[in-house]
Amino acid sequence: MGNGGKVVEQQRARELRADSWTLADIAAELGVAKSSVLLWVRDVDFTPNPRRTARNRPPNKLQRQKAAEIERFTREGRQRFVALSQSEFFTAGLGLYAGDGAKRGTTVQFSNSNPALVGFFCAWLRTFFDIEEARLRVQLHLHTGLDLDAAEDHWSNVTGIGTGQFQKAYRALADPTRRHNKHIHGCCHVKYASTSMLRQILGLMDGLFLISSPSILPG
């Protein structure tokens, strides 16, 4: 049918162009190619509107679809995991440690900047291992210029570990070649010095991934 069949889209595109919408915004709103929009509105007077910036312009069609999909999947995820069995909790914790936990040395250590993951790890460690609370340590990696006291209070609340057990924070110097949207509370490293516990966790991980390998799973 070609572009000539999109009568409704063409008319809407002309209306939006007259309202100072950019070609890219119109294309995204209508779900059509930018080249098509250009043909449809080439004779429409256009005056750039400085108020239509990325910050204050209304979300376009694709952005609305994205937001709706994220909301739907988040709702479905929360409905699915109303509660975890002990077995599920234990297995999830092993997988989490496999991704962000230390695999060498003499210390169990988990590092992340996501409070939900750090809190999950601390709950997992306390649930399944016999630990002495006084031996738990936290070290923060924080960029210079960010509030260290606020960061320590934040991570103390997340981990349930008092700030008196926090080690000296590592302060990263500013680097213009690195990311600019730095985490305001930095990266948290939860530590528990125990060679035997680390070996136990690594052995459990090995067993988990062994039975999960494609050669062992049922066909």
Image (spheres, rainbow, N blue to C red):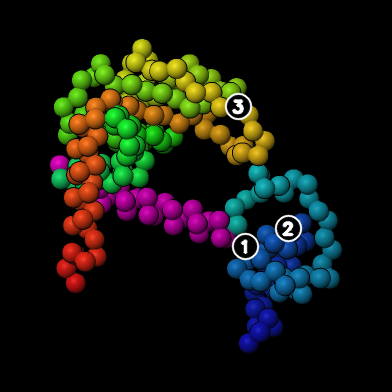
Comparing 206 with 25, the one in front is 206
Left or right: residue 37 versus residue 183 is right
Comparing 55 with 12, the one in front is 55
Amino acid at the residue labelled 1: Glu
Could you tell me which secondary element the residue under label 2 belongs to? loop
The C terminus lies in quadrant: bottom left
Q: Earlier in the sequence, mark 3 or mark 2?
A: 2
Residue matched to label 3: 173
Could you tell me which secondary element the residue under label 3 belongs to? loop
Q: Earlier in the sequence, mark 1 or mark 2?
A: 2
Residue 44 picture location, percent across and down? 82, 67
Task: Note whether residue 11 is visible.
Answer: no
Mark 1 crowd level (few <14, some 14–19, many ≥20, 10 Å Cα): some
* Cα gap from disc 3 to disc 2, whole angstroms: 42 Å
Residue drawn at (67%, 35%) of the image: 176
Amino acid at the residue labelled 2: Trp
**10 versus 138 height, above or below:** below
Amino acid at the residue labelled 3: Leu
* Cα gap from disc 3 to disc 1, whole angstroms: 42 Å
* Residue ranking furthest to the top: 164
Residue matched to label 1: 29
Instruction: Please name the predominant secondary structure of the magenta segment in the image.
Output: helix
Residue matched to label 2: 21
- Check if residue 197 falls in the magenta segment: no
Residue 75 picture location, percent across and down? 34, 50
Could you tell me which secondary element the residue under label 1 belongs to? helix
Left or right: residue 20 versus residue 150 is right
Query: Which mark, residue 202?
Result: none
- Check if residue 81 falls in the magenta segment: yes
Q: Which residues are magenta?
A: 61-86
Mark 3 crowd level (few <14, some 14–19, many ≥20, 10 Å Cα): few
Mark 2 crowd level (few <14, some 14–19, many ≥20, 10 Å Cα): many
